[in-house]
């Protein structure tokens, strides 16, 4: 109840927000919520499972060559997501390179390193420091990491010669034997 002795200068009135401001705020909030829900639904529907067919992709290697998954059909492909800032990737790098040197002469398995959320200069220094010889490229637009639905680095995917996903490794390989066992899953056995 207002003070009957109050002067007009002492009486405060509540100002309401214009209707158009409230309308814009509600529409913006609803739009954001719809966007969030659709994104979550999309990521759940498209997650990769063993036996999934991997869509064709192209990666530009650090030496400027475009390599597509389709051009490698008939070979087993190991796709390893890594970053120069990733401490466990540092431990895993020599293991990957050693395995590559052992299996590369047979020519039936191809390694593709995918640098994730990194700068190209830092990635190049990493590759040189650890003498990485297998093909590597940067996922600048993050489209490849989104296609594989990675959750972090390192993550490794094994694609069979017919283009299906045969194995997934979340986290680093701790030994060459572990990596070679992973590669034995190339036929889906």
Image (cartoon, grey):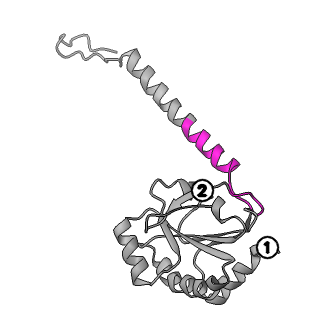
User: Could you say which is closer to the camera, residue 132 or residue 6?
Assistant: 132
Quick one: label 1, few (<14), some, or many (20+) residues within 10 Å?
A: some
**Which of the 4 image quarters holds residue 171?**
bottom right
User: Could you say which is closer to the camera, residue 92 or residue 186?
Assistant: 186
Looking at the picture, does residue 21 appear above or below residue 186? above
- Residue occupying the point 61% across, 57% down: 149
The extreme right residue here reads 189
**Residue 177 appears in view:** yes
Give coordinates of residue 124: x percent, y percent: 39, 73
SS at badge 2: loop
- Residue occupying the point 53% across, 82% down: 92
- Residue beneath label 1, please? 187
Q: Is residue 185 left or right of residue 94?
A: right
User: Could you say which is closer to the camera, residue 24 or residue 77?
Assistant: 77
- Residue beneath label 2, please? 57
Please provide the residue range marked out in magenta: 35-54
**Which of the 4 image quarters holds residue 179?**
bottom right
Quadrant, the N terminus: top left
Q: Which of marks 1 and 2 is nearer the N terminus?
A: 2
- Residue occupying the point 68% across, 85% down: 180
Q: In this view, does 45 lie to the left or right of 60?
A: right
Give coordinates of residue 84: x percent, y percent: 42, 73
- Residue occupying the point 62% across, 74% down: 110
Q: Is residue 53 part of the magenta span, yes or no?
A: yes
Give coordinates of residue 57: x percent, y percent: 60, 56
**Which of the 4 image quarters holds residue 99?**
bottom right
């Amino acid at each position: 109840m207002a003070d009957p002795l109050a002067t007009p200068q002492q009486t405060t009135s509540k100002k309401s927000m214009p209707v158009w401001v409230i309308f814009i705020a509600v529409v913006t909030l609803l739009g954001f919520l719809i966007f969030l829900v659709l994104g979550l639904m999309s990521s759940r529907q498209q997650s990769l499972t063993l036996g999934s067919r991997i869509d064709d992709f192209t990666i530009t290697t650090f030496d400027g060559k475009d390599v597509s998954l389709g051009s490698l059909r008939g070979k087993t492909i190991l796709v390893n997501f890594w970053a120069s800032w990733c401490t466990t990737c540092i431990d895993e790098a020599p293991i990957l390179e050693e395995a590559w040197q052992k299996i590369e002469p047979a020519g039936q398995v191809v390694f593709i390193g995918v640098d994730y959320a990194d700068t190209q200069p830092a990635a190049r220094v990493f590759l040189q420091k650890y003498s990485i010889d297998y093909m590597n490229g940067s996922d600048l637009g993050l489209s490849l990491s989104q296609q594989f639905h990675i959750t972090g680095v390192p993550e490794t995917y094994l694609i069979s010669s017919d283009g299906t996903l045969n194995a997934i490794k979340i986290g680093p390989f701790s030994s060459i034997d572990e990596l070679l066992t992973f590669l034995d899953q190339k036929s889906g056995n």
